[in-house]
Amino acid sequence: MCLETGLPFSANPLPDTEEVVIKLSMEDVQVDYYENSLHQKFKSSYDFFKHIKSIGASVSKTGKQLSVKAFKILNDHWNNKARGDVNIEWHIVYIAAKKN
């Protein structure tokens, strides 16, 4: 949605899965990982962002933040495009490391 509106993407970067697995594997550790996709519906983009805040994922580690006006533009665009529920697909990676 940020690309479509021309707004900066301000979400926190996520770690690279392959890099994490490789670094863990360099130790005396057995590493297994599993990837899965989960789908979740929200009544609006506002509800999605409220959810992000409720789980503590809204704290910026980069210092990037949209202005109130830019955030409103993003939400309005997303809600107009969705024309109903906002569907989110979460790509989840589970990593288990067991010391040998």
Image (cartoon, rainbow, N blue to C red):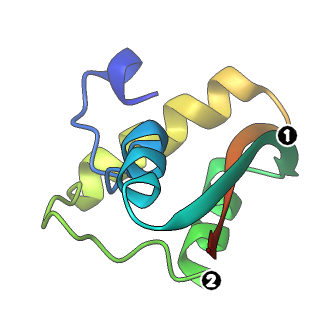
Read off the residue under disc 2.
54
Image coords of residue 70 (percent x, y): 27, 45
Q: In which quarter of the image is the C terminus?
A: bottom right
Where is residue 35, by image quadrant? Answer: top right
Question: Which amino acid, by three-letter code, is at mark 2?
Answer: Ser
Tell me if mark 2 has few (under 14), some (14-19) or many (20+) residues whose alpha carbon lies within 10 angstroms of its own.
Answer: few
* Residue with the mark numbered 1: 85
Residue 12 in the image: state x and y as whole percent: 32, 57
Q: Which residue is drawn at 25% across and 22% down?
A: 6
Please determine whether, in this image, residue 1 is positioned above or below residue 99.
above
Amino acid type, callout 1: Asp
Q: Quadrant of residue 51?
A: bottom right
Q: Which residue lies furthest to the top in this view?
A: 4
Helix, strand or loop at label 2? It is: helix
Relative to residue 35, is residue 24 drawn left or right? left
Residue drawn 65% across the image and 21% down it: 81
* Residue furthest left as drawn: 63
Name the residue at 51% across, 44% down.
75
Instruction: Bin the neighbour count of mark 1 within 10 Å (Cα to Cα): few under 14, some 14-19, many 20 and up.
Output: some
Label 1 element class? loop
To which quarter of the image does residue 95 belong?
A: bottom right
Residue in front for this viewpoint, 62 or 64? 62
Q: How far apart are marks 2 and 1 (CA)?
A: 19 Å
